[in-house]
Amino acid sequence: MSSNDIFASDSPAVPVPTDSPFLTEPTVRDEAPQFVLPLVVHIEKTAPPARTDALRTAARAVLTILSDERSLDDGEWAQLMRDWQDARIRKVVRRARGAEWRKASALPGITVTGDSAEVRVFPPVPLDGWPKELAKLQVSGTDLDDPEPPAAPGPDGPVLWLNPDVDMSAGKTMAQAGHGAQLAWWELSETEREAWREAGFPLSVATPDPARWRELTASGLPVVRDAGFTEIAPGSCTVVADHPALRR
């Protein structure tokens, strides 16, 4: 699994500021101290989570920490969250089981559960300042599958659409799903955010056919473009963040 700098662009019709985290070329954001948002997925050998549920749960974990009162105003994580979002926004997904998971769960953070997945998200840390309990966790070597084909997303709910032509590991895809959820969050009004939060951040993750993917990337919805530090080429479109309030 892997981490990944964002990131993304909105519709070409929307100007992107020169200091935007959506740009992959160097910007003033690179001059700021760099932080990373750690996520740890609970994977026991005998009972791994379903891949799609892990993707959904990672995205919901990102939304949960963005909206948590500790991340807002004068909350205890608020300055870290601001520093992280002022620089290049990075996410790293690692895996843990057994005692590793229990130690990670004892650190300040939030555990979000899905149907079969558990993901714990932590407040941002400096790139070179990971807690030892997290630093030793593995980034690579995790393969997740869906034991049954995932249900098709409903027409009225948020959907994170994955590029059908880009092959990514489970961890890389979890990070990209988190990016997509964050882009949707940034685009919503406070009222729309609160409604989503109160509903428990329901969302789907799905892979469209190539023709539908082309329509989505041209629709004006937020698009994640990976910086290309791992696994895929720089600028690759990985996720379209589709929320009912953002549909034009």
Image: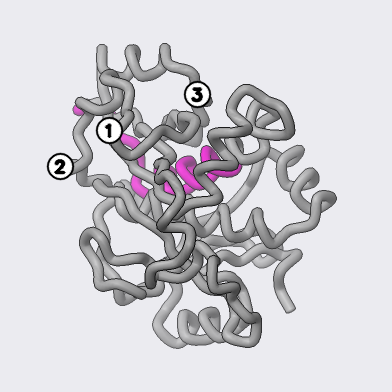
Q: Residue at x 54, y 66 (%)?
A: 20
Question: Which of the two residues, 248 or 79, is positioned nearer the viewer here?
Answer: 79
Which residue reaches farthest left?
141
Q: Main secondary structure of the magenta part?
A: helix
Residue range highlighted in magenta: 45-63
Depth check: give the residue in front, 35 or 189.
Answer: 35
Q: What residue appears at the point 34 percent right and 74 percent down from the top-left corner?
A: 236
Q: CA distance from mark 1 to mark 2?
A: 9 Å
- Closer to the chain start, of discs 2 and 3, is 3
Query: Label 2, on which residue?
Result: 141
Q: Is residue 145 visible?
A: no
Question: Looking at the image, which residue is at 25% across and 26% down?
Answer: 44
Give residue 49's position: percent from left, percent from top: 34, 37
Answer whether residue 90 is magenta in the image.
no
Q: In terms of sequence position, does the residue under pointer 1 or pointer 2 come before the other?
A: 1
Could you tell me if the residues under marks 1 and 2 are in contact, i.e. CB atoms within 8 Å?
A: yes
Residue 211 at what x, y percent from top left?
Answer: 45, 87
Residue at 42% x, 12% y is 106
In the image, is 192 to the left or to the right of 65? right
Q: Quadrant of residue 71?
A: top right
Mark 2 is on which residue type?
Gly
Q: Is residue 151 left or right of residue 167?
A: right
Instruction: Name which residue type carries label 1.
Output: Arg
Marks 2 & 3, CB-CB < 8 Å contact: no
| The disc label shown at residue 95, or none | 1
Q: Which residue is mark 3?
A: 109
